[in-house]
Amino acid sequence: MNNAGGFKSKRYRREFMSDESYTVAGRNMPEISIAAGATLSVWGIIAYFLSTSGSPTALIPMIFGAPIAILGLLSIRMPEKRKTFMHISAMFGLLCALGGGGMLSGIDSDTETLKIASFAILFLVGAIYTYFCVQSFRWARKQREAAEA
């Protein structure tokens, strides 16, 4: 890696990162936020309708996913507030990972498969999204430090 946090090879830098923003597979963080939030929201709605009890707790992934997606949209619409929106969104991602992981540790043999799947999706999407957020924040800091030097 070079001092700015990017790849040494120009081929990889063009494909995965630009000098303007941190990207993953060609997508910037607001786009990743929308995708992660939409994934959680859609799963929450599906789980609610598949649930035999019809419990509103099946919507928990949607309750955390919707703000992530909305904050991603807001950061596209209002780029001057992107840093604030992405930090709040990262907090929701961390809550997803912690909540899903915590609930996964409390499952037993009587736990419904749908409930286990919801916790797993909440944990995985939240953990991966939080990882990307942290990497994005680190990348931005390195870019800022390189510009100051």
Image: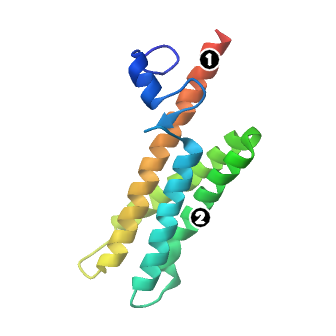
Q: Position of residue 121 (x, y in %)?
A: 39, 63
Label 2 crowd bin: few (<14), some (14–19), many (20+), radius 10 Å: many
Q: Position of residue 14 (x, y in %)?
A: 46, 25
Q: Residue at x 48, y 73 (%)?
A: 44
Provide the secondary structure element on which disc 1 rests.
helix
Q: Residue furthest left?
A: 109
Q: Residue at x 54, y 28 (%)?
A: 139
Q: Quadrant of the C terminus?
A: top right
Cα–Cα gap, marks 1 and 2 = 33 Å
Whether residue 3 is visible to the viewer of this picture, yes or no, is yes
Q: In the image, is residue 62 above or below residue 142? A: below
Which amino acid, by three-letter code, is at mark 2?
Ala
Residue matched to label 1 = 145
Its colouring scheme is: rainbow
Residue matched to label 2 = 66
Q: Residue at x 53, y 69 (%)?
A: 62
